[in-house]
């Protein structure tokens, strides 16, 4: 019985991993106009559950190119707009809602999280889920 549960859990994990990798094939480069496209309500209602959610598709590019690192809070607000600031327990100064998590079961929100040093410059950027 325990072996079958382990096998089932392993199968589900593999399917989820493969699905996320498939979603990542649709990722795009950061585009400021697309990031700021429409109102927040529109981003929630029209794009949140779709693979076409524009913000989540740009996050890997934002993180990989590291172009937010070293920027001040004011520079990031000028670029990305006001943060949504989900209250994570960790010291993530800014959080931008980017859509629902990747994977076949989209239950949690995904966030672009930015951590700042004592001089208010970005030192780490990563994706988080609530």
Image (cartoon, rainbow, N blue to C red):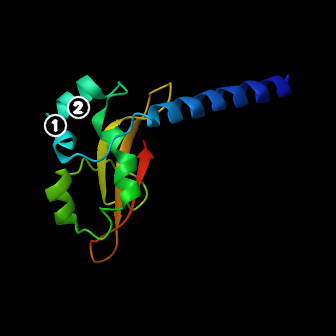
Tell me the residue at 32%/76% (across/down): 118
**Mark seen at residue 43:** 2
Q: Which residue is mark 1?
A: 37
**Along the horizontal axis of the image, is 92 left or right of 24?**
left
The spot of residue 18 in percent (x, y) is 58, 31
**Residue at x-position 43% and y-position 58%:** 90
Q: Which mark is residue 2?
A: none
Percent across and percent down for residue 65 are 36, 58
Q: Is residue 20 left or right of residue 2?
A: left
Give the tally of numbered discs.
Answer: 2
Q: Quadrant of the C terminus?
A: top left
Residues packed near mark 1 inside 10 Å, few (<14), some (14 to 19) or many (20 plus): few
Foreground mark, 1 or 2, reads 1
Cα–Cα span, label 1 and label 2 = 8 Å
Left/right of residue 40 with respect to residue 57 in the rendered view: left
Q: Camera-side residue: 11 or 40?
A: 11
**Quadrant location of the N terminus?**
top right
Please tell me whether mark 1 sits on a helix, a strand or a loop.
Answer: loop
The reply to whether discs 1 and 2 touch (Cβ–Cβ < 8 Å) is: yes
Where in the figure is residue 7, as x and y percent of width and height?
78, 27
**First along the sequence among labels 1 and 2:** 1
Q: Is residue 109 above or below residue 3?
A: below
């Amino acid at each position: 019985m325990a072996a079958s549960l382990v096998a089932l859990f392993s199968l589900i994990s593999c399917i989820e991993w493969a699905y996320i990798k498939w979603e990542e094939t649709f990722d795009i480069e950061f585009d400021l106009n697309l990031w700021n496209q429409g109102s927040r309500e529109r981003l929630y209602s029209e794009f949140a559950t779709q693979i076409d959610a524009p913000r989540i598709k740009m996050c890997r590019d934002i993180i990989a190119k590291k172009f937010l690192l070293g920027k001040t809070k004011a520079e990031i607000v000028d670029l990305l707009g006001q943060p949504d600031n989900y209250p994570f327990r960790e010291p993530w100064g800014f959080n931008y809602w980017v859509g629902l998590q990747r994977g076949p079961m989209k239950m949690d929100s995904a966030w672009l999280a930015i951590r700042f040093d004592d001089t208010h410059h970005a030192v780490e950027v990563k994706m988080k889920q609530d």
